[in-house]
Amino acid sequence: MNFLMGMKILNLNCQKGEQPMLESFLRKALDGGSYDFLLLQEVDAKVLAFLQHPSYALLRVFNEETGQDSQLCIAYRKTCRLSKSGFKSLSFMRYDPVRGFKHPAFGVLWADFEIGGKMIRVASVHLHSGTDRHIRLAEMEMVKKILLEGDHLPTAVTGDFNAGWPGECDGLARVFAPEFSWMTKELGPTLDSRYSENVAHITNRVAAFLGIFNIGIRLRTDHAFLDSKTAGSYSMICSILPDRVSDHSPVECMIDFTQEAPIL
C-alpha cells in the first residue's frame, strides 16, 4: 500500500466459521491482496486456519480475563510495520448465561502501523450482544477513551457494535463524537438473524424460531468510524458486500488520501 494514495479495510464478524463459504471468501480476499487490513471479530482456531497467507501477518492476543485467546484479530500486509498494539477485554461488562464473565468475543484490539514513513492506527471492536443497550454505551465510552490515549494518530475503527434498538446506532455515534466521525451512517442493515447460530441466549432463540418460517430480523450492527481530523480532510467510502459468509455481511472501507473530503 502507498499510504499517500489510499487504504482499504475489510470488516467482518466471522461467526466462528459457521457459514461454509467463509473459507473461500477469506482465501480469495488474501490471495487478491486488495485489503491492507482485515479487522475481524469471532475468529477462533477454525477461522484462524483460513487466514494463513504468506503476504499477511496476524495480530491476536491472549485474554487474561477469560483465560483463552481473544476472538478479535487484525490481519495486515507484511509491508506494514507493526509499531505497537493494545487490547482491552470487555467480557466483564455483562454476565453471559452460558459463559458467565468468561466470554472471549468482546473487547477492542488496536494497533499502530508505520506505512511509508507515516503512522496509522486501526482497531477492531466487538461490543456485547443482547438486549441491554446501556452496556454497549458504557463499552463505547471505554473504547473511545482507550483509542484517544497516547499519540493522536489517524485512526480507523471498525467492528460489530451489536446495536439493535431503534436509535441505538445514533446513540453510539454520539458517544464517539466529536473526536470520531461515523462513516457508515448511510449504510443499511448488515446482520440477518436467519443465519445466526441457535445458542442459549434469548435473542438467538427468537431468531432460530423465526428462521423456521424464513423470517429474519435485519439490523445495522457493523460500522466504521474515522478520526474527525482525517474524516474532515479525506474521503472514506464504505459499502456492504453481498457475500453470505456469516450472519454479518462484510463491510468494505476505502480511504482515499488523494481525494479531499467534500465540504458540506
Image (tube, grey):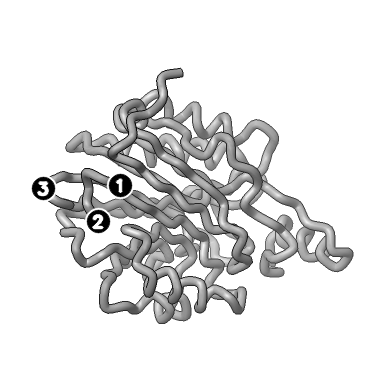
Tell me: 241 left or right of 257.
right
Of label 2 and label 1, which has the lower sequence position?
A: 2
Q: Position of residue 148 (x, y in %)?
A: 28, 35
Query: Spatial distance from mark 3 to mark 1, Cα to Cα?
Result: 14 Å
Residues at marks 2 and 1 touching, judged by CB atoms closer than 8 Å? yes
Tell me: 119 left or right of 130.
left
Disc marking residue 208:
none
Judging from the image, what secondary structure is the residue with disc 1 in? strand
User: Residue at horizontal 26%, vertical 78%?
Assistant: 54
Q: Quadrant of residue 181?
A: top left
Residue 65: tell me if it is visible.
no
Circle 2 is placed at which residue position?
Answer: 1
Label total for image: 3
Judging from the image, what secondary structure is the residue with disc 3 in? loop
Q: Looking at the figure, which quarter contains the N terminus?
A: bottom left
Q: Position of residue 18 (x, y in %)?
A: 60, 74
